[in-house]
Image (cartoon, rainbow, N blue to C red):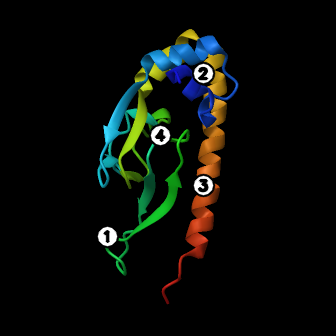
Amino acid sequence: MSTADFLSACELFVGLDAGELEEIASIAHEERYEAGEIICAEHEVAERLFILCDGRVEVRVSLDSPLEPGGEMTIQEVEPGRLFGWSSMVKQQRFTASVRALEAATVLAITADDLNALFDQNAHAGFVIMKQLAEVIASRLRRTRVVCAREPQVD
């Protein structure tokens, strides 16, 4: 399967035509991570967006508090074809969570600068991707609320 074909099934690129998918494929590069390896760390400068090709990764957030220093919570496991590292595409450009490989994983990485340059050349692609990105962020927020509501409360 070509990179463009793989990208066509990714939640972020739904609605793009074959030419636009080829443009994105041309700026994406493959990276491999071993089990236990941190792909991106919470609060670190976010410069790249990632799409999971294969393997398993988990998204974790810090819950540091005086009652539980160093606490963390898994928000979700990312499935192949889904993205993480969306913080690279918003103004703050700091990761809001950490992502760790649970097993060997392959990702496609795209720098935010390259993607933004593509948006400058192709407003349609930029509009579609940012619209999809807003949906991804909203979905992650809903999921985080559900996960946090299930966590036992400390009295």
Kindly check if marks 4 and 2 are in contact, taking CB atoms under 8 A apart as contact.
no
Using the image as rendered, state which of residue 13 and residue 90 is in the foreground.
Answer: 13
Residue placed farthest to the bottom in the image? 155
Mark found first going from the N terminus, 4 or 3:
4
Q: Which mark is residue 52?
A: 4
Q: Position of residue 69 (x, y in %)?
A: 32, 74
Mark 1 lies on a secondary structure that is loop
Q: Which mark is residue 141?
A: 3
Q: Position of residue 75 (x, y in %)?
A: 51, 60
Q: CA distance from mark 1 to mark 2?
A: 38 Å
Q: Looking at the picture, does residue 41 appear above or below residue 62?
A: above
* Residue occupying the point 58% across, 18% down: 21
Q: Which mark is residue 62?
A: none
Kindly check if marks 3 and 1 are in contact, taking CB atoms under 8 A apart as contact.
no
Mark found first going from the N terminus, 2 or 3:
2
Mark 3 lies on a secondary structure that is helix
* Residue occupying the point 35% across, 50% down: 43
Residue annotated with mark 1:
70
Mark found first going from the N terminus, 4 or 2:
4
Amino acid bearing label 4 = Leu
Mark in front: 4 vs 2:
4
Amino acid bearing label 1 = Gly
Amino acid bearing label 2 = Gly
